[in-house]
Amino acid sequence: MFFTIRMRSIEKRDGFTLIEILVAVVLSGIIIVGLMKTFDSLINAKSYIEAKKERIEILDKISLIMQTDIRCKIGDFKIETDGMTKKLSFITTHSLFFNGAVPVNVSYWLSQNDNGKRFLYREEKDDKTGVDLLIPLTTVFSKADYKFYLNGRWQDSISQIVKISLSSKGRVYNITQRGMIEQ
């Protein structure tokens, strides 16, 4: 017995098989899921960067005000405390109210307002003109501390060089007359 093998000619077909369509749908699904995750990551990164940028701008502006106040200081620093709030006071020729070199008493402290929000305050007083300007600078800080450089180290004893330490979300920002340093 002889077997004959008969070959059929392959006909040209129109369209795709069911398996080819399923493979294309699965691959398209994988690509779409990947693109959605990438898009979601980009949105989250953008939100994080915008929030960080706003925070850095606030810190930068506050740091510049404080640095200028400290650099233009006349006389000695004073620390006042009422048990809960520690207030740094000094005379500076950097007046925000007069927009110029007018000696004013400036104080910085961290305190809660009537709504329970914690603000970093800057108060500017001039007894001669009766000006009393109280500015709530920001709500981003949870703690404020003041140290003075004396005998090669930072301590509580008042001297001519101050470091204002402001805490926010586990980070500490140290402001001196030379700049701001994040720890």
Image (cartoon, rainbow, N blue to C red):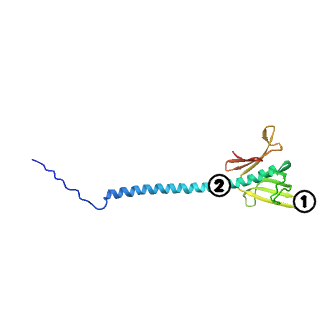
Q: Position of residue 141 (x, y in %)?
A: 71, 52
Residue located at (61% from left, 54% from top):
49
Q: Residue 121 sits in which quadrant?
A: bottom right
Q: Are marks 1 and 2 in contact (CB under 8 Å)?
A: no
Q: Which mark, residue 27?
A: none
Distance between mark 1 and mark 2 Cα atoms: 40 Å
User: Element type at marker 1?
Assistant: loop
Q: Residue furthest left?
A: 1
- Is residue 41 visible to us here? yes
In this view of the protein, which residue sits in the foreground, 116 or 181?
181
**Location of residue 97 in the rendering, given as x and y in whole percent from the top left corner:** 81, 60
Residue 89 x/y as whole percent:
83, 51
Residue 145, x across and y down, in percent: 76, 47
What residue is shown with label 2?
A: 53
Residue type at the position of mark 1: Lys
Q: Amino acid at mark 2?
A: Lys
Q: Which residue is mark 1?
A: 128
For the residue pair 70 and 9, the one nearer the viewer reads as 9
Q: Is residue 140 visible?
A: no
